Image: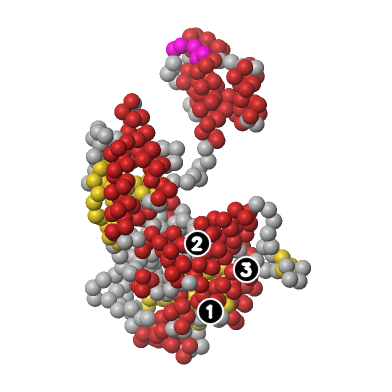
Amino acid sequence: MTEGIPLEEHKRQHMTPHAKELLRSLPSVSAMLEHEEVRQWLHGLPRASVVAALQAAIDSAREEILEGGTQEPVDMQELLARAEQALLERSIPSLRRVINATGIVLHTGLGRAPLSYAAIEAITEGASGYCSLEYDLATGKRGRRNTHVVGDLITITGAEAATVVNNNAAATLLILQTFAAGREVVVSRGQLIEIGGSYRLPDIMHASGASLHEVGTTNRTRVSDYERAINDNTAMLMRVHPSNYHVVGFTETVPIEAIAAVAHRYDLIAVDDLGSGALFDLAQYGLPEEPCVRASLAAGADLVCFSGDKLLGGPQCGIILGKSSLLEQLDSNPLMRTYRVDKLTLIALEATLRAYFDPEDAVANIPTLSMLRASTDRLAERARKLAEQLEAALSDERFYVCSDVGYAGGGSMPGQELQTVVVKWRPSQFSAESMASRLRDAETPIIVRIRDDAICFDLRTLSGSDLEGLVASVSSAVWDEAEA
């Protein structure tokens, strides 16, 4: 705006006669719709999409004229090319499959856990028509959606009861609002976490109506700290897994067994927010130790909650396990309907959980666990093959197989380095940042790690089906960049 005049109108008032003539030369949308090429578009595309693309092409040309960026008439072919580009951009979805070459298995920005083939097949089958989401096939009456996974969760974890909500933040909030609204919740100061997306436990406490009672210090909390904090207004004692950091040195924490014992002595609820939530002991498969759901329940936790799309390797959801009497209250909370999961989540979760009846099956077929467990020998073998394929496609470039370290990501195994193997590439003519940008712009975007001005393709998160597309995209990016 300039003195109350819209900016475009201000530009028009100060245009040269030549610029005004250029504006008048622009065709209308109606005129462009009569063009033979546009008529061909209309045979296969919705008219509204074509009209919008034509209007966008005309608008961009008009803006260039108003800005003084062009002195020549914009011909029809130029406008058609712009419209075609607009149609192409509209046809590409914003939410796209990418190749994860970062080595971060549970990459939050890239959707965390990739689903197993069984889960993908189940979604395809369940989404292709109707399904028994809230229909009891035995009785012919209305059923409850969470029953499809509750039985499996109970069998796998040994819990009395279970329920599912749309993420672990919702699980935590639902627990607090149901059992501690207007009352106090005792938590160690060292566990007042903040994770990605500005999730802060104190803020969740406030939103639930509960009052936070901090105990201990950042690095040391004792059983006596919990006991001294208990008063007539205390509702629960809560342990929270510090999922994205690790305190080392002069530290002391209270195990869930001791927290639960104190809680039960005073007739309080003991809650264990595990965050990632491993369904069995990962250490037996050579992985870093992570709090185990079954162990927490066996230790006396009344309620345990964790995410479905982290170490479980399933879809995004929040899982709550524990005492039947408490789960009944959670399920009857009016908020439960606002946090419920959809049919596709339940279908994927049920298929994922089936693998956990045999941990060996889970480790072999759940992508998250399989990638985390992959040995460096196996990764090195695949890295050498990838390097050979890249050098065959790009004879002027050099690719090296190197050892490196990565992380599980997604708040899992905080502070634990995972030994890995990468194919390292320092582009001969362009910076690593420039080439990484080109790779993100590929038909199937490739997301890489950059270290020491070199691109690293981490084999831990690259599946066999990714490699051919990766080589093709890297080759295309080099050739296109060279031509540019």
197 shown above or below 297: above
Q: Earlier in the sequence, mark 1 or mark 3?
A: 3
Q: Earlier in the sequence, mark 2 or mark 3?
A: 3
Q: Residues within 10 Å of mark 1 (few under 14, many from 20)?
A: many
Q: Secondary structure at mark 1?
A: loop
Give the farthest residue toward the bottom.
265
Q: Where's residue 391, x and y in %?
A: 28, 39
- Residue flagged by tag 2: what amino acid is it? Gly
- Residue flagged by tag 3: what amino acid is it? His
Q: Residues within 10 Å of mark 2 (few under 14, many from 20)?
A: many
Quadrant hosting residue 222? bottom left
- The reply to whether residue 27 is in sight is yes
Q: Earlier in the sequence, mark 2 or mark 1?
A: 1
Point out the stretch of residues depicted in magenta: 71-75
Mainly helix, strand or loop, the magenta region? loop
Query: Horizontally, is 464 left or right of 234 in the view?
Result: left
Tag of residue 314: 2
Query: Horizontally, is 131 left or right of 3 in the view?
Result: right
Q: Secondary structure at mark 2?
A: loop
Tag of residue 159: 1
Q: For the residues marked 2 and 1, what is the alpha-carbon distance in whole angstroms? A: 19 Å
Tell me what residue is drawn at x 36 percent, y 81 percent.
254
Tell me what residue is drawn at x 35 percent, y 35 percent.
475
159 shown above or below 104: below
Q: What colour scheme governs how the chains and residues are painted in the rendered image of this protein?
A: secondary structure
Residue 311 is covered by the magenta coloring: no
To which residue does mark 3 refer?
A: 148
Q: Secondary structure at mark 3?
A: helix
